[in-house]
Image (cartoon, helix red, strand yellow):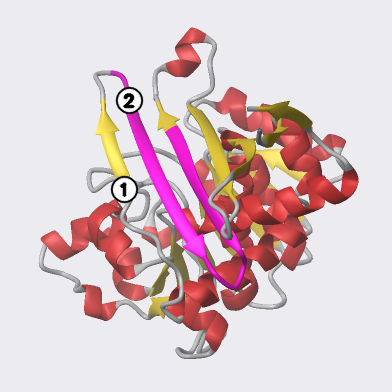
């Protein structure tokens, strides 16, 4: 018989503090850049209401073998349900035996934010103090926590299509001692040192003219070719990094749209996050430069985060056990 450890959303959050998650991403992206990881392109199955994604990965250095199954159903909030549901199954890389089942939406939010934290650590100006976040859905809270883990932020500005969600997030952050306020998009972006966008928009959510020189941008949404968060002008003038070139070419709408318009080439990318970690490509080259990280999300992130969370959960006695 096999014993399976089951980690709830609360267990995952307790087992994977943001600094640990960021370090797990640092190792995982380095493995990916070295060509050590096995991570096929994720499989999409689309229904009338949403999309299910199947994402396997193996990281030998991280001793991580896992698959995530995640669904993104945009109309769920109208039903009183989260937009994202997910599960991650962790296997023993030595035997293939199932080891654990983790709640996937929380893991996804943390690992996505951890990539943001890593990119911000590598690219944002050290003196950055003002963070703007556009989109106040399920990803937003952890995006803020990730940036706070790597920079001394004195002001967080939150903007969303429906202002109520921005108000709620700002209130939650203030209750945790974080100086945050809800505002409109333009007021949030103007003068911000770091900008995070976490939306499913199909058109730009901010104006290029509002992005100040020296800003760093993290684009977290726009995970299909039809979606877009940044104006083409911002992509064209920024130093752009991605999590994976092939994945970006297939899924990163912000980049795909300017390539299709004949304004940009994948060869114009500055590099990947893993190449930055390994020092194979330069990062920020001047205080005035705009840097930009475009994330589409990779299975290696899920595998690395799940393995790190499982190890800590076992040490802390978190979760429950099920006999299969």
Question: Can residue 64 be found in the magenta stretch?
Answer: yes
Question: Which disc is residue 236 wearing?
Answer: none
Say left or right for 288 vs 309. left
Give residue 216's position: percent from left, percent from top.
53, 68
Q: Residue at x 52, y 71 (%)?
A: 29
Which stretch is magenta?
A: 49-70
Q: Which mark is residue 50?
A: 2
Give the CA distance from mark 1 to mark 2: 18 Å
Say few, some or many: other residues with alpha carbon within 10 Å of mark 1 (under 14 / 14 to 19 / 20 or more).
Answer: many
> Picture quarter containing residue 266?
bottom left
Kindly identify the residue that appears in the image at 38 percent across and 41 percent down: 54
Left/right placement of residue 30 relative to residue 148 reads left
Q: Position of residue 283 (x, y in %)?
A: 51, 84
Q: Secondary structure at mark 2?
A: loop
Mark 2 Cα-neighbour bin, 10 Å: few <14, some 14–19, many ≥20: some
Mark 1 / mark 2, whichever is N-terminal: 2
Element under disc 1: loop
Quadrant into which the C terminus falls: top right
């Amino acid at each position: 018989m096999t014993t399976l450890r089951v980690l709830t959303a609360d267990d995952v959050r307790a087992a994977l503090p943001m600094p640990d998650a960021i370090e797990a991403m640092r190792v995982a992206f380095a493995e990916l850049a070295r060509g050590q990881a096995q991570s096929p392109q994720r499989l999409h199955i689309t229904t009338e209401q949403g999309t299910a994604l199947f994402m396997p990965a193996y990281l030998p250095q991280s001793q991580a073998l896992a698959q995530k199954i995640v669904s993104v159903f945009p109309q769920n909030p109208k039903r009183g349900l989260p937009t994202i549901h997910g599960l991650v199954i962790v296997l023993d890389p030595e035997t293939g035996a199932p080891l654990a089942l983790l709640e996937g939406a929380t893991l996804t939010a943390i690992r996505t934010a951890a990539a943001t934290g890593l990119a911000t650590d590598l690219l944002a100006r050290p003196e950055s103090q003002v963070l703007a976040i556009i989109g106040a859905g399920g990803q937003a809270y952890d995006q803020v926590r990730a940036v706070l883990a790597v920079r001394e932020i004195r002001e967080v500005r939150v903007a969303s299509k429906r202002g109520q969600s921005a108000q709620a997030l700002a209130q939650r952050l203030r209750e945790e001692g974080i100086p945050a306020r809800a505002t409109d998009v333009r007021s949030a972006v103007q003068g911000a040192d770091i900008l995070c966008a976490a939306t499913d928009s199909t058109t730009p959510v901010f104006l290029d003219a509002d992005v100040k020189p020296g800003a760093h941008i993290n684009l977290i949404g726009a995970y299909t070719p039809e979606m877009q968060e940044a104006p083409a002008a911002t992509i064209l003038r920024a130093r752009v990094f991605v999590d994976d070139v092939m994945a970006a070419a297939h899924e990163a709408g912000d980049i795909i749209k300017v390539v299709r318009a004949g304004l940009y080439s994948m060869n114009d990318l500055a590099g990947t996050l893993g190449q930055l970690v390994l020092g194979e490509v330069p990062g920020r080259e001047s205080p005035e430069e705009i840097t930009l990280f475009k994330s589409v999300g990779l299975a290696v992130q899920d595998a690395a985060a799940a393995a790190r969370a499982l190890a800590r959960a076992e040490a802390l006695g978190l979760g429950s056990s099920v006999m299969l």
